[in-house]
Amino acid sequence: MTSTAAAWLLKTEPSSYSFADLARDGRARWDGVANPVALANLRRARLGDPCVLYHPGKEKAAVGTATIARAAYRHPDDAGDWVVDLEAGAALARPVTLAELKADPAFAACPLVRQGRLSFVPLTREEHARLLALAASR
């Protein structure tokens, strides 16, 4: 992998565009990232990087997986905006809540926990593996 993160966690309000919407569509342009730090993260994402989709709001949980299908590029309708394309993966076996992540020492330094407002968050290899392990546990 050529990006500086092992994986990415992307936040999306289910009422705007949910993981179920991505799963239905198969592939989608990921836009609307405005925070400068989140935007810098988006621009570091590379083709093939794994992603975890997270629903904030009432759910506050990681719910599914995806892959970067096209690295960062200028939005065709707004040259000032950067986007990536995502390819849908699978729903997680069970949602992993923010409370679980905050309680797990593996996520102590994770920007999801430290900078909660970021919508495009880097995950280390260890954080990504741990999140997937939590999703697989009952």
Image: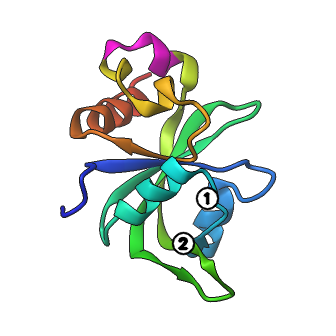
Q: Can you say whether 62 is above or below 113 in the image?
A: below
Local packing at callout 2 (Cα closer than 10 Å; few below 14, some 14-19, many 20+) is many
Q: Which residue is mark 2?
A: 83
Q: Amino acid at mark 2?
A: Val
Q: Position of residue 83 (x, y in %)?
A: 54, 72
**Picture quarter containing residue 40?**
bottom left
17 horizontally vs 96: left or right: right
Tell me what residue is drawn at x 72 percent, y 48 percent: 13
Do the numbered discs 1 and 2 sit on residues whose CB atoms are within 8 Å? Answer: yes
87 horizontally vs 125: left or right: right
Q: Amino acid at mark 1?
A: Val
Tell me what residue is drawn at x 70 percent, y 32 percent: 59
Q: Position of residue 8 (x, y in %)?
A: 40, 50
Q: Position of residue 132 (x, y in %)?
A: 36, 37
Kind of element beneath mark 2: strand
The secondary structure that most of the magenta stretch takes on is helix
**How far apart are labels 1 and 2 at the CA level?**
8 Å
Q: Which residue is mark 1?
A: 33
Task: Please name whichever residue, 114 or 29, is drawn nearer the observer in this view of the structure.
Answer: 114
Task: Name the outermost residue toward the bottom.
Answer: 76
Q: Specify the segment rendered in magenta.
A: 100-105
**Picture quarter containing residue 134?**
top left
What is the count of numbered marks?
2
